[in-house]
Image (cartoon, grey):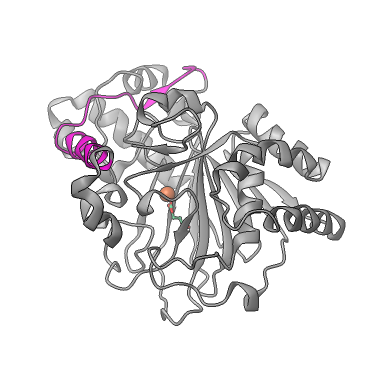
Amino acid sequence: MKKFILSEREIDEIKSLVKGITSQYSSAEDDRFLKDASIIAHELPKRIRTFINDFRLLEPSSGVCLISGYPISEEKIGKTPSHWQYRQEISPALEEEIILILFSTLLGDVIGWSTQQAGHIVHDVIPIQGHEHEQLGSSTKELLWWHNEDAFHPYRGDYLGMMCLRNKEKAATTVAPVDATSYLNPEEIAILFEPRFTIRPDESHLVKNKSDLQKTQANNDNLLSSAYQKISEINSEPEKISVFYGDPKCPYVRIDPYFMDINKLEDDNEALTAMNKLIKSIESNLTELVLQPGDFIFIDNYKAVHGRKPYTTMYDGQHRWLKRIIVARDLRKSRSARPTATSRIIF
Ligand SMILES: O=C(O)CCC(=O)C(=O)O
Ligand SMILES: [Fe+2]
């Protein structure tokens, strides 16, 4: 994994850049800030711009990079919220959210989903009481199966970014590169390049995880209703897709085993065998990473998978708290699902 440790001087430079932004914008999701973010990011320290640019263009095989050392003020961020719907008018982590967006814009354009976390672009990854056994980022007692983010969706992001504010529980994020040619033969790779597989939407996009506010609005919001309708259609009749795409000598991957109904592949023995071999190989390459406060991790969603191990938490306001973001390299790809050219939210 590529690692970068911020120097004192770089931290000072970032802080003074962010100060100028927080004096103008009270939300990291402000449209004007999002439009200008890629310009402002030019003012980040050169070493960090080079590091992220290299991650984007050189596509290192690890598929993961880590930037660490940003100081987090426990006092300033305050208590971890108990649910992602309970947002304060002005985020106590506005500074950190802005940095996450600035780093992200060096990889592409940030996007969000109307069907996830109430259509927010910066997500909260926190344990939520009642979700313990769900297959969700907010679960604790269950293994969050490794996956590509939003693998079910044609407009899934190219990268997933996460910033750690708090992780006293030492919950481990899991990551693995998908280096297909080192564990599969050309015939198996060719099978995985064929549209013989399905991926259903993960639980975070389902109606049952809508925000309370969206539940009350849903009936008079046609756009949102149709977005949930699309999710429901993919859920009941997922199209056949390939697991690999791109260059057969170094394939990109689209995989989320928990939602792939692998048992239904029984009448396609070749596909089942290749898929199981791939899953086993990824499993054996999985490593654990306990994010520390002040860590930013970017995962190449075409080249690596990630998940999370089960953990124990007290839900005491000091519980785990990550900020999370999705980045697309080509915003235009999803234009038909976004109301305007500048809108970041996919419906
Ligand atoms: O909690 C983690 O470390 C990862 C969670 C995750 O997979 C996600 O939020 O996309
Ligand atoms: Fe994830």
Point 54% across, 70% down: residue: 167
288 or 33, which is in the foreground? 33
Quadrant of the image containing the C terminus: top left
Q: Is residue 65 visible?
A: no
Which residue is farthest right?
A: 9
Residue 305 in the figure: left or right of residue 200: right
34 or 194, which is in the foreground? 34
As for residue 183 lying within the magenta part, the answer is no
Residue 186 in the figure: left or right of residue 237: right
Quadrant of the image containing the N terminus: top right
Q: Position of residue 17 (x, y in %)?
A: 77, 52
Q: Position of residue 111 (x, y in %)?
A: 48, 39
Point 22% across, 42% down: residue: 225
Q: Quadrant of ligand 1?
A: bottom left
Point 71% across, 33% down: residue: 54
Point 23% across, 24% down: residue: 240
As for residue 242 lying within the magenta part, the answer is yes
Q: Which residues are magenta?
A: 224-249
Q: Position of residue 229 (x, y in %)?
A: 19, 38
